[in-house]
Image (cartoon, rainbow, N blue to C red):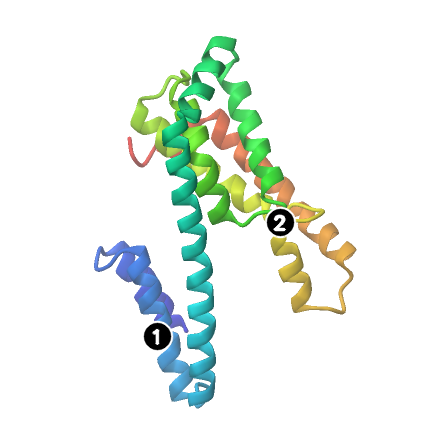
Amino acid sequence: MLLVFIAVVGGIYWGIFTPTEGASVGALGTGLIAWASGGLTVGKFGEALIATASGTAMIFFIVLGAAFFNSFLALTQVPQVISTFVVEQAYAPWTVLAVILVIYLVLGCVMDSLSMILLTIPIFFPMMTSLDFGLSPEHMAIWFGILVLIVVEVGLITPPVGLNLFVINAMDRATPIRETYRGVMWFVASDIIRVVLLAAFPSITLFLLN
């Protein structure tokens, strides 16, 4: 497994392949290890293919639905109307950012990350680009994108209905869900502190780019 890790991470950092291609390299490496150790039988390989096809189909249905939704937004000009409304209200940019991040935390309790990003970014991103954070458009896009990705994942472990909490709890059914909530709160608190720091000091996010 250490060799697989070195091959994947090393290949990404050396520019041999992209992170997406690195995922396939990791899958191939672990598959070969499972086959060599006798754990990957024909039956289990078939089960893996079926599970992969089901997950892929689900993701593509989400993407298809988001494509229809984005077409609706483009025709109705909803993002432009909302961004114009926000600018006309003269809300402080940091207030708008805080509200958006809180919305993502709440949505993370009931939606998966891909659905959230595909359905909300077409609305929130034009709104953010219309506000002045003292950053260039390129820097603002990267900074906001990183904040969104972090908060979306934090929302998935936020009690009481964070989706990943039930996945974690299902791995150890002897542990009460209340104990899972109690244990994950330290991670939620530390992640919220991290988001606040990244939002207050964009240079932390952008220093490599600069």
Percent position of residue 196, x then y = 55, 30
The answer to which of 4 and 44 lies nearer the viewer is 44
Q: CA distance from mark 1 to mark 2?
A: 30 Å
The answer to which of 55 and 95 lies nearer the viewer is 55
Left/right placement of residue 3 relative to residue 170 reads: left
- Name the residue at 39% across, 71% down: 2
Disc 1 marks which amino acid?
Gly
Q: Which mark is residue 151?
A: none
In this rendering, does residue 148 appear at all?
A: yes
Percent position of residue 71, x then y = 37, 37
Q: Is 153 situated above or below 75?
A: below
Q: Which residue is mark 1?
A: 29
Disc 2 marks which amino acid?
Ile
The answer to which of 77 and 167 lies nearer the viewer is 77
Percent position of residue 83, x then y = 44, 19
Under circle 2, the secondary element is loop
Question: Quarter of the image containing the C terminus?
Answer: top left
- Name the residue at 49% across, 46% down: 115
Under circle 1, the secondary element is helix
Left/right placement of residue 192 relative to residue 12 reads: right
Percent position of residue 108, x then y = 58, 44
**Furthest-left residue in view?**
16
In this rendering, does residue 90 appear at all?
A: no
- Name the residue at 34% across, 75% down: 29
Q: Which residue is mark 2?
A: 157
The answer to which of 83 and 76 lies nearer the viewer is 76
The image quadrant of residue 203 is top left
Q: How many marks?
A: 2
- Name the residue at 38% across, 78% down: 31
